Amino acid sequence: MSEETNAGQAAAGTETPAAAEARKRAAASNFLPIVRGRLPLLFVHAIRFDAVLNAMSNKDLATKFATSVGKVFDIKKGRNFGYVNAEFKPSAEDVTAAEAWIAQVGGTNAKGLATVGDKNVMQTTLDAYKAKGLATAEEVAAFSVARTATRKPAEKKEVAASAAGAQEAVQTTTSGAADDLLA
């Protein structure tokens, strides 16, 4: 059967089971077997600034840290997590997030796939950051300020609505003047 015939049958509701099977969504095997969610900032800093890790390929780092190659590429290029600079020190929350990330490796992710990653590399990285010491309350506050400074401020709906109202008022005044000339 040709594609036009299958399309015509689908429209008429007489589609063959093989054609219906071919149009189904891709199998779950097409999804990445990674930990889903936001990569902990501690690992972001390690990927970007650790000399040994930075020498590894993006694919190797993605496999070791249970994330995607694209995420590692963006971290190395500075396209995301721009607020994580060389002076970053992890807070207790960052350590907890890293421990939770490590705990998910080997389990199943949201797509039902067994997540892959190198728990030894991640645990070694975490231990190295713990040994250097955690951030103080002042450092956490300064990091929070730096983080919010990098984000774009969201335009509030009231401001957008008042700007639209002002635009309508200008258009109404102008159109009324033009109508008087035509009368």
Image (tube, rainbow, N blue to C red):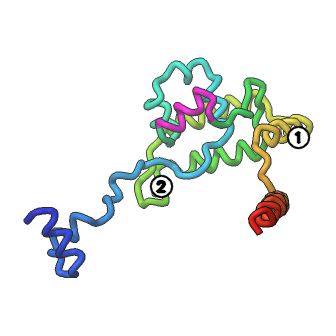
Q: Nearer the viewer, residue 142 or 66?
A: 142
Q: Main secondary structure of the magenta part?
A: helix
Q: Is residue 74 magenta?
A: yes
- Label 1, secondary structure: give it: helix
Dot 1 or dot 2, earlier in sequence: 2
The disc placed on residue 3 is: none
Residue that mark 1 sits on: 141
The residue at 67%/47% (across/down) is 97
> Image quadrant for the C terminus?
bottom right
Q: Nearer the viewer, residue 85 or 56?
A: 85
Splitting the image into 4 quarters, where does residue 26 fall?
A: bottom left
The residue at 21%/80% (across/down) is 12
Q: Which residues are magenta?
A: 69-79
Say whether residue 157 is visible. no
> Image quadrant for the N terminus?
bottom left
Residue that mark 2 sits on: 107
Where's residue 122, x and y in %?
57, 36
